[in-house]
Image: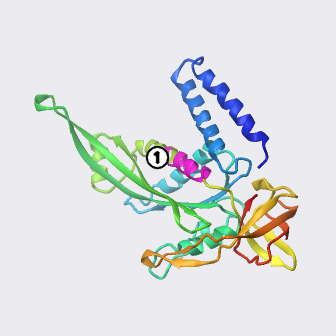
Amino acid sequence: MRPFKNLQLIITAMFLLVAVSMVPGCSSFSTIKKTTKKIARDLKSPDGDMKKKIGIALFDNKTFCDNQCFEEFFFTNLASTIKKACSDILLVKPGDAGCPAFLTDFPVQPTGQLDNLALAKAGRQIGLNAIVTGSLIDIKAVKEEHGFLWFKSVSNIVQMQMVVEVYDTETAAKLLDEIFSCEIEVNEQEFELIKSKKAEGIAGFKNAFTHIAGVAGEKICDTVAMQPWKGYVVSISGNRIIISSGRKSGLIAGDILEVYAGEKIIKGKDGRRFFVPGLKTGEIKITTVYSDKAAAVSISADDIKEGCLVRIK
């Protein structure tokens, strides 16, 4: 672990905590609060000086609003929130140059369910630590009563729900599986449109999706930040070992990485399969670093295979 980054973060955090009492106004306090929260994430991160890489896929739209481009709008705001909340996280997403196909066309099982193991394997090949998926699952209109007796009033409410999942490439298990929701008040005409499964011209929808994306993005950032950085062996040629992370992730020549077995698989519920974290098998030393890959040689590991997991020592 490089020692100086955490010291700088601690000093900055102390300064901000003092500054909170000196800066008036809600917006100023909110900005400082978010900055302090980001520093807290960095301090708690097991590998504060390493940059984790996550992939974000376009979200499915399982509602009747299938012609509104809501999923793309949500996706754009979610990616933006994650980048702001965790600036040290590297994002790979549809629309980027060289974005892998599995982020737009997920591997599926014969049953039609997402193949979590195949997804994790694909993510390992490009050095992903986690993969974010999800769906817009429900939009419905309800009337809510307020008050009592002759003081009662009725509001037209539209409820929206989004499920967000984060898969760990080390185990292929979910790090996060949560439903995020938001309610907006609409007028009677808009309410009737939603009831009849139409959504043209509902201006508040985008504000609602922006809100959900903000909350979900912060939760994803918290979840990923608490995980240790990890890389994967993707090929071996003689004594030359290639891993799927490089300079962008923070690796430098001379870094020592611990190697762990990671190819054992177990079956779970509904035909899902998972990787079983293995024991440490040795250590390797980084010799050459590229943008998104690195070459290494073995120091004390003899049983290195493709798929082995590596961590900073």
- Give the side of residue 241 with respect to residue 61, left or right: right
Amino acid type, callout 1: Ile
Q: List x then y, in percent, for residue 28.
A: 57, 24
Q: List x then y, in percent, for residue 48.
A: 70, 47
Residue annotated with mark 1:
212
Instruction: Judge by depth and name the residue closer to the eye, 67 or 298.
Output: 298
Residue at image location 83% in from the left, 58% down from the top: 255
- Give the side of residue 269 with respect to residue 14, left or right: left
Q: Is residue 219 magenta?
A: yes
**Which colour assignment does the render follow?**
rainbow
Residue at image location 71% in from the left, 66% down from the top: 126
- How would you rate the neighbour count of disc 1 (Cα within 10 Å): few for under 14, some for 14-19, many for 20 or more? many
Instruction: Judge by depth and name the residue closer to the eye, 40 or 69.
Output: 40
Instruction: Judge by depth and name the residue closer to the eye, 280 or 205.
Output: 280
Q: Quadrant of residue 178?
A: bottom left
- Say if residue 92 shows up in the picture: no
Q: List x then y, in percent, for residue 60.
A: 48, 62
- Give the side of residue 24 with respect to residue 146, left or right: right
- Specify the segment rendered in magenta: 215-226
